Image (tube, coloured by chain):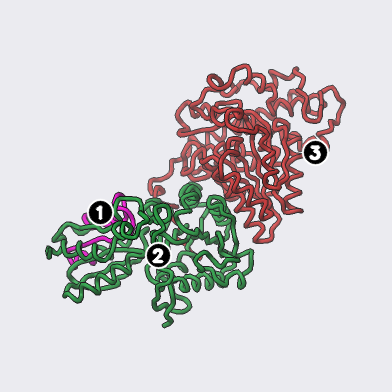
Chain colours: A red, B green
Amino acid sequence: MTTETKKPPVTETKKEKPKASTNGADGAQPTPLKEFEGTTPEVRRELLRSMLIQRRFEERCAEAYALGKIGGFCHLYIGQEAISTGVMSMIREDDYVITAYRDHGTALARGVGPRAVMAELFGREAGCSHGKGGSMHLFDAETNFLGGHGIVGGHVPIAAGVGFAIKYRRGNQVCVCFFGEAAVNIGAFHEALNLASLWDLPVIFIIENNRYGMGTAISRSTANEDVVIRAKGYRMDGESVDGQDVFAVREAINRAVERARKEKRPTLLEMRTYRFMGHSMSDAVSGTYRTKDELEENMKRDPIIVLHNKMYESGELTEGEMRKIDDEAKAIAQDAWDFADASPEPPLEQLYTDVYSDTSS
Amino acid sequence: MAVLTYRDALTQALREELQRDDRVFLMGEEVAQYNGAYKVSKGLLDEFGPMRIVDTPITELGFAGVGVGAAMVGLRPIVEFMTWNFALLALDEVVNVAAKTLYMSGGQYKMPMVFRGPNGAALQLAAQHSQAWESWLAHIPGLKVCTPGTPADAKGLLKSAIRDDNPVVFLEGEMLYNTKGEVPEGEHIVPIGVADLKREGDHCSLITHGKMALVAMRVADDLAKEGINIDVVDLRTVRPIDVEAIARSVQKTNRAVVLEEGWEICGMGAQVVDFIQRECFDDLDAPVLRVHQEEVPMPYAKNLERAAKPDAGKAVAAIKKVMYLD
């Protein structure tokens, strides 16, 4: 569905009954659905909108990559949007967010401007990292978005450090740290979890388990696929969550945020999800390491479709309204593209700026 | 002026900067209750408490990353590695994050922090504990690398490093901690990137840094008895390098030897020689020679270790060779 932007995905599947979610909603229930508790129709619409913006934006990324407007490595988040949207909807502006290189959706959901993100991907001065970071290194100090990190697991201890700084200042913010399930086998993950628990740091570690570390299935990489059990090794609370259901994500993150703010304790969350695209743009969507059937089966639980169907069947969203939200998302993506495309490249003098800060305290 | 050990000079700098700025904290293995593996942080836990003098588990990558994260959001960490040999486990945080984040973020996230600890060989610690890492670290744009050889430089450079808004790699020496020298009290600042002419003479330039500065001064004093007077250019900082100081000296003496603790291939000395051939090509009366560790992992046996290390005798021989006295 990446480049076919003519129809919203939901119009193709609207008749389909939603798969049972964690709470067992089957779509036949009268409103309000149990998982709608604590949200208003406006909030639900905003969640849908956030996910659709990420989806439509990244579909255009794939297109721009094919046209050579985006270079380097480019890892799409498509299929995982309920996680970024659900998490960001439950944290505060003064909290901190840090993630790995599959960072476009996370940045957009956090509130980094679509124009600034697309301009970064296009390598333009107006990009959120002024064209020096690219796809894997989106940064935005305005929204406490601490990157965009390219070495698997390398940023997990940094999240512990942000938690340390919060504790040092006696603040009550949290730091949310996203990484893929393949990172749980690297030392940095273990060192960070140990320190965060040992020192009571307000950090929420989120394993986005999309089941493949590049082309290696979790069953081929991880001795115990129950990755969240690793929390126990560090005397930490852990929870496994349906990452395709934005309400399940919100409930779990809410518990973790409460724990961090009130008990000053870290949490490990596993968000079970699926990557609908290849690992990066050079990787076929399916083929050598996973089958087309598996992919199609998982795409039935597209997080956007899951939410849409719930809202549609509860009667609070018409097809016309859905199309309107989707058209807005497409327009935002188009606007980001147009902006990035028209933006100047960084001037050559900037090659040498920001290697060092010329300030001291 | 007070005479202090290199160790006490470092402690003084830490104490003064901890008092000056409450965003500064020290973390590392054994820095607090144990008073530091080499006692550099002696007494600091009592004075500043466990939130600012932080004992860590043996988890170099983990606590280096904690320092990086804390620096990103405005604290000013000093991360102590018990030795730089152990810091190899943490280099992803030093090289990939601390050094690059200001650039990758387009100037949004500064990294005001210091990574410090002993570097290079001590005595009979064998191959894994006897390595000089400055050429690795000086290779990385985004890092600054300090290599003080005397107590006064140790204090003045550490204060500069802690106040700098960039990640500073601070390489001390296990064999230096007990050495003594005069150290100015209070606000003594040595700017990063400025060499110091530790001996003056017209016959040859001996360019060095770190622990070898002491050897170089001894060489100068010995040669002076033979009527050979040399410049000792102590770089003190190997990134940035004070190229002007090198050029000034070599343009005066027309001869140079570069003395360093580490290995030859891609060593700091190779970089210094490159500067000299570019800046002083027409000034040279002889090829520039280098003195360095032999190209072997450090052996344990006393005699083999002595043979592997650069020393005063090797430096003297090289100086006499570039002066065509041999």
Residue B99 lies left or right of residue A209; in this view the side is: left
Residue flagged by tag 2: what amino acid is it? Ile
- B274 part of magenta stretch: yes
Q: Quadrant of residue B291?
A: bottom left
The residue positioned 75% from the left and 35% from the top of the image is A248
Asked if A258 appears above or below A117 in the picture, the reply is: below
**Residues at marks 1 and 3, common chain?**
no
Q: In x, y percent, where is residue B202?
A: 18, 71
| Count of numbered circles on the image | 3
Looking at the rendered structure, which numbered label has been put on residue B274?
A: 1
Asked if one can make out residue B233 in the rendered structure from this viewpoint, the answer is yes
User: Which badge, 2 or 1, comes first in the chain's sequence?
Assistant: 2
Q: Name the quarter where the N terminus of chain A is drawn.
A: top right
- B56 part of magenta stretch: no
Which element is circle 2 on? loop
Residues shaded magenta: B249-277
Asked if B252 appears above or below B100 in the picture, the reply is: below
Q: In x, y percent, where is residue B155?
A: 44, 71
Asked if one can make out residue B101 in the rendered structure from this viewpoint, the answer is no
Q: In x, y percent, where is residue A301?
A: 70, 24
Which element is circle 3 on? loop
Q: Which residue is mark 3?
A: A39
Q: Which residue is mark 2?
A: B192
Q: Quadrant of residue A170?
A: bottom right
Mark 1 to mark 3: distance in Å?
A: 67 Å
Q: Sort mark 2 into few (<14), some (14-19) or many (20+) by Cα contacts within 10 Å.
A: many
The residue positioned 24% from the left and 65% from the top of the image is B313
- Frontmost of labels 1 and 3 is 1
